[in-house]
Structure formats: C-alpha cells, structure tokens
Image: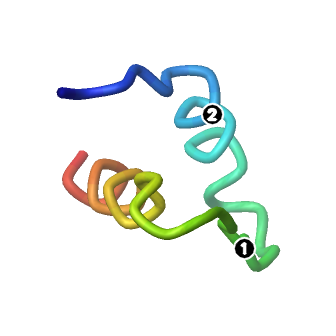
Amino acid sequence: MDIERNDYLRQLILRKDNGMIKIITGIRRCGKSFLLFHIFKK
C-alpha cells in the first residue's frame, strides 16, 4: 500500500540544491527513507 506524498516530495525536490541541510522527521515506519530513496532514484 503506497500513500501519495506528492506535495511533500515536490517541496523537497524544489529545495534540494539550495545549500541548506534538510531534516526529515517522523515516527518509525512512516516513509522517511522511502521519500529520500524516491528523490535519489530520479
């Protein structure tokens, strides 16, 4: 089961190269690593 996180993913991609460090927080097994792998895969 995949949960669509298009808005959050789009915001991360837009701010990817601005030189700032991004911190993605959340409870266990909420998809933090999945978002990062999705960005790097593209």
Q: Residue at x 53, y 36 (%)?
A: 9
The residue carrying pointer 2 sits among few (fewer than 14), some (14 to 19) or many (20 or more) residues within 10 Å by Cα, namely few
Q: Amino acid at mark 2?
A: Tyr
Q: Residue at x 76, y 79 (%)?
A: 21
- Numbered disc total: 2
Say whether residue 1 is left or right of residue 22: left
* Picture disc at residue 23: 1
View extreme (front): residue: 28
Residue 24 position in % (x across, y down): 66, 66
Residue 14 lies in what quarter of the image?
top right
- Disc 2, SS: helix
Q: Quadrant of the N terminus?
A: top left
Residue 15 position in % (x across, y down): 72, 49
Q: Is residue 6 above or below residue 11?
A: above
Q: Residue at x 49, y 69 (%)?
A: 28
Residue 29 position in % (x across, y down): 39, 62
Residue position marked by numbered label 2 in the rendering: 8
Say whether residue 31 is left or right of residue 40: right
Q: Amino acid at mark 1?
A: Ile
User: Foreground: 18 or 8?
Assistant: 8
Q: Residue at x 32, y 55 (%)?
A: 34
The span from disc 2 to disc 1 (Cα, nearest Å) is 13 Å
Q: Is residue 1 above or below residue 26?
A: above
User: Foreground: 27 or 33?
Assistant: 27
- Disc 1, SS: loop
Q: Earlier in the sequence, mark 2 or mark 1?
A: 2
